[in-house]
Image: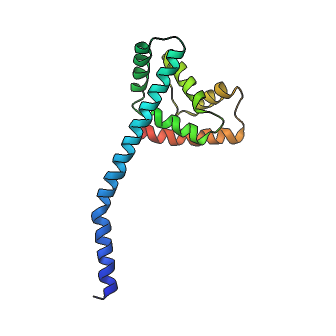
Amino acid sequence: MTKHNILRITLVVSVLAFNPAVAQVLRANGLAQTSQQRSSLIKALAQQLENKGLEKEAAQKIVTSFMDTHHGNLDVMALNVLQSCPQISKAQMVAYLSDEALHRRNVALHDYAQLNHLFSKVTGSMPEDAQRNKLMQIAKINQGLMNA
């Protein structure tokens, strides 16, 4: 064997050996970030409900129940919408979600029709073609999260 082959074999073996360890570290960091996003969204929704006049405990109970019905994906889906649709601000998203939580409505941010409704309600206008295409892409991405 030549020096180059030995170097290649060593490189391949080291990549294969350390790849699971790197994946575990990245997965742990991703889970921590997701947990932090969920906690942040819960706090923001509860605060919004408190601002509407609910007691702190009642607001917390409503928001926790609302988040539990969405299997932990709502925060990631909402973040996808915010990142992909600059017409919707974080405050508008929190106001929309808190209203839906208060009235105990189901929110399906993986559904194109629901995203159109969200956009129309928050911005006060119907989405244009480019925006509708973007909402379709967001719906597909969020649908993938539901299937994962």
Q: Position of residue 126 (x, y in %)?
A: 71, 30
Figure coloring: rainbow
Residue 4 sits above or below residue 45 on the image:
below
Residue 84 visible in this rendered orientation of the protein = yes
Front one among 124 and 89: 89
Which residue is outermost to the bottom?
Answer: 2
Q: Position of residue 129 (x, y in %)?
A: 71, 40
Residue at 67 percent of width and 39 percent of height: 131
Residue at 68 percent of width and 28 percent of height: 123
Q: Position of residue 43 (x, y in %)?
A: 45, 26
Q: How many marks?
A: 0
**Dividing the picture into quarters, in which one does residue 17 lie?**
bottom left
Residue 148 visible in this rendered orientation of the protein = no
Residue 135 vs residue 45: left or right? right
Residue 1 sits above or below residue 19 on the image:
below
Residue 86 vs residue 4: left or right? right
Q: Position of residue 124 (x, y in %)?
A: 70, 25
Residue at 58 percent of width and 34 percent of height: 112
Q: Quadrant of the N terminus?
A: bottom left
Residue 17 vs residue 67: left or right? left
Front one among 54 and 104: 54
Q: Quadrant of the C terminus?
A: top left
Residue at 41 percent of width and 31 percent of height: 39
